[in-house]
Amino acid sequence: MTDAGDSPIPAPIAAIRPRRLTSPFGDRIDSYYWLRDDDREDPQILAYLAAENAYRRATMARTADLETRVYAEIVARLPRSDASVPYFKQGFWYYDRFDPDAEHPVFLRRRGSMDAPEETMLDANRLASGHDYFQIGAAEVSPDGRLLAYCEDTVGRRQYRLRIRDLSTGVTLPTVIEDVEADLAWAGDSRTLLYVAKDPATLLGVYVRKHRVGTDPRDDALVFEQTDRSFYTGVSQSKSERFLFIHMESTVASEWRYARADDPALEFRVFLPHQRDHEYQIEHAGDGFLIRSNWNAPNFRILQAPAETPSDRATWRELVPHREGAFVHDFEPFARFVAVSLRTGALRRIEIVPLAPAGAEPGRTGPFLVDAEETAFTMDFGDNPAVDGDVLRYTYTSPTTPKTTYDLDVRRGTRTLLKRDEVVGDFDPARYQAELDFVAAADGARIPVTLVRRRDTPLDGTAPLLLYAYGAYGLCVDPTFSVSRLSLLDRGFVHAIAHVRGGQEMGRAWYDAGRTHHKRNSFTDFIDVTRALVARGVAAPDRVIAMGGSAGGLLVAAVANMAPALYRAIVAQVPFVDVVTTMLDESIPLTTNERDEWGDPTVREDYEYMRSYSPYDNVRAQAYPAMLVTTGLWDSQVQYFEPVKWVAKLRATKTDRNPLLLHVEMDAGHGGKPGRFEHFRDTAMEFAFVIDCAGR
C-alpha cells in the first residue's frame, strides 16, 4: 500500500466552497465547512462519506485477507465465554458473564452464596437485538436490592436512555427518561433516584433531577442546575451508602455537594465552593470525610475532616502527605486502612496507609507499597464495596501479564489469586519482554517510554515500530496487557508508548507542561522519542508508524505537519484536528469545558498559540506519510466533520502519492463499535494497514 495510484477507484475530491469564519482576531476561510451537518441527514454529505468508505475499502482490498486473518487471530485468543470475579454487597454476590460467542454481558447475582440459584438482572444481548449499536453505560441496584436502574445507548452519541427494572418480577417499568448521563445514585428509600439530564444542544450534563419510581418523569424535581458550562457534573453514592454526592469538575477546579441518603428532602450542602486551582474529591469514612486535595499540594494529598466541621480547612488533618515524586490518583477507604492509588516513577501502584496499628500487616506499622513483580506494570482497585474487613481487592497487569485480580489481606500480608484473564492458544508470557525506559527531550525533560517486543525480535535497527501516545487532560496511557497487540509483536514489531507531557505520568507538573501554552511539548516529546528509538536501533528508520486517538489523534496529526519524514505511516483515530474552529463554537459538545485545557480563543495570545499548531490550519504543500484516519458519524466527543474536513484538505494539498484513507463508522461514535468481539474489527483494519505499511 505504497501508492494512492494502486486504488482501483479514484479518491473522492471534496468540492471547495469557501466560507468565512468570524473570530475576534481576524476572519478565516474554511473551504470544507460545508461538510458539517449537525443532524447527520444531508444526502450530499452522507454520499460523500459513503464514497470515502468505498475508496478505503477499494484501496485496502489487497489487504482484506490480512485483515480477516488478524481479526481471526485476535478473537481466537479470547475465551468463548467469560465471567467477572464476583463481589459481595448487601446480601448478594454480583458478577457479569459473557455467554459463548455473545457480544454483550449478562448482569447476574446470587443471594447469600455462590451456591444459590443464579438471578439474571439484565441481559444486554437481548436488549441489543435489532440495534446497530448498543451499550450499557451504567447499572445501579437500589439499596433494598429490588430495583435496577440502567442507562443504554443505541446510537453511540452518549445520549443515554434511563430505564428501571423490577428485579423481583423481572419486569422493566414503562418509565423512560431520555438524554441523560451514565451517572446514577439511589437514595436510601430505594425509590428515589438521582440522575443528570443533558442539554440537548451541547450534550453537557447540567440538570440534576430526582425521580420517584412510579411517577411521571415530567414531574421530576430539579435538584441542581449547572450554570457554569466549564464544569462536568455527575452524581454518586458514598461507599458507606449514607450520603449522596453531586460533583462538579473542570480542568482546574472542583465542587462537591452532599446530602444524607436517608433525608426525604435530599437537601444538599456545599462541601467547599469551587475555587480556581483547587481540585478535590470527597468520600465518607467513619465519622467524617476523607478528602483528596491539591490545596498546597500540586501532586495531591489525602486529609481527614470531622463530620461536625467538614468544610473548615482548619480542622482537617493530613493523612497522606504531599510528595514531590508521588502523584495521588485516587483512594479507597476502609475501617482500618486507606488504599491509595499512587503514581511513582511513571508507574501506577497501590499504597496501604493504616488508620490504626491493627490495620497494618504484622511488622509494618506505617504505609507500605503493594509488591510488584515487573519493571513495567499497572495496579488499580478492584470491586471493594465493603468498608469493614482487612481485604483489598486489586488488579495487576503489565504488557506481558494479562489482567490479574487479587485479594490482599492487609493485616496478615497474604495475597490470594482470584483470576487471571485467559489468553486462548499457545500464549507464553516468557516469549515477550517489556521495560520502562526514559528518553531525553530537547529541553532536558526525561520522557518515560514503555517498550514491549518478542524476545527474539532484534534491536539492530531493522524492526518495525508502532509508537502510540495520548498526552492530554492529565490522562495516562498505562503499561497494560493487550490481547490484540500480540498480532503485531508476533510479526516482529516493537510496540512503544511515549508518555509525553500532557499526561500525568510524572505528576501534575507533567500535565501542566503539556497543556494551554505548553501544548507543543506533547508533540516535540513524541518526535524526540521517535528519533531516540531509531538512534538506539529499536526501530528501522523507514518503518516507524505513529498512532493516536482523540487528543492523541491531534498529537499525531500535528506531528504529521511538523516532522512527516520520520514516519512511514500514521493512524489517526477519531482525531481532534480543527482546534480553533471548535474552541470558538460553544454549540459543539465539550467546548466550554475545554478552555483550561487548550486555551480561550477569545484571548489573542491563546488564539494565536492554538492556531500555530492546529492540524487543520497547518496543512501545507509537502509530502505526508501514508495515513489512515477514522471517525464515527455519531461521535459526540470529536465531531465527525473535523477528521472529514482534514482529510479533504490534505488530499487537495499534499504533494505525495502515499495513500490517504478515511474510515467513517456510520453506526457508532467516539469509541467505535461496541461488542466483545465486534470491537476488534476496527483494530484488525488498522493493524492490517500498519502491517502492510511496514512491509510485514
Image (cartoon, helix red, strand yellow):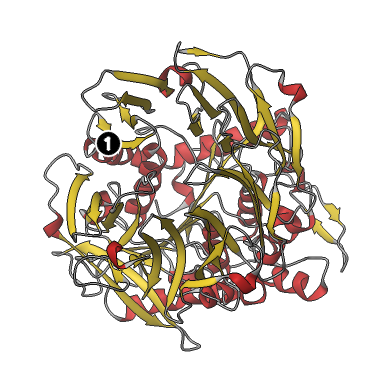
Residue occupying image coordinates x 55% and y 41%: 10
The quarter of the image holding the C terminus is bottom left
Q: Would you identify the image quadrant in which residue 40 lies?
A: top right
The answer to whether residue 315 is above or below residue 553 is below
**Would you say residue 47 is visible in this rendering?**
yes
205 relative position to 409: left or right: right
Quarter assignment of residue 685: top left
In the image, is 214 to the left or to the right of 218? left
Give the residue drawn at x 68%, y 59%: 594
From the top left corner, tell me how far across and down residue 148 is, in percent: 49, 25
326, above or below 386, in the image? below
Residue, x 63% and y 74% (percent of image)? 314
Q: Which element type, helix, strand or loop, lies under badge 1? A: helix
Numbered-mark total = 1
Q: Is residue 533 above or below residue 139?
A: below
User: Considering depth in this image, is 257 or 76 the residue closer to the camera?
Assistant: 257
361 vs 311, left or right, is left
Please, what is the three-letter code of the amino acid marked with disc 1?
A: Val
- Of residue 492 and residue 171, the one placed in the foreground of this image is 171
Q: Residue at x 50, y 73 (%)?
A: 318
The extreme front residue here reads: 308
Along the viewing direction, whichever of 503 and 21 lies nearer the viewer: 503
- Determine crowd level at label 1: few under 14, some 14-19, many 20+ residues with C-alpha closer than 10 A: many
Q: Position of residue 415 (x, y in %)?
A: 18, 55
User: Dot 1 corresponds to which residue?
Assistant: 75
Residue 257 drawn at (x, y percent): 66, 51
> In front: 300, or 492?
300
Asked whether the viewer can see residue 515, the reply is no
Q: Which x, y percent locates residue 256?
A: 65, 54
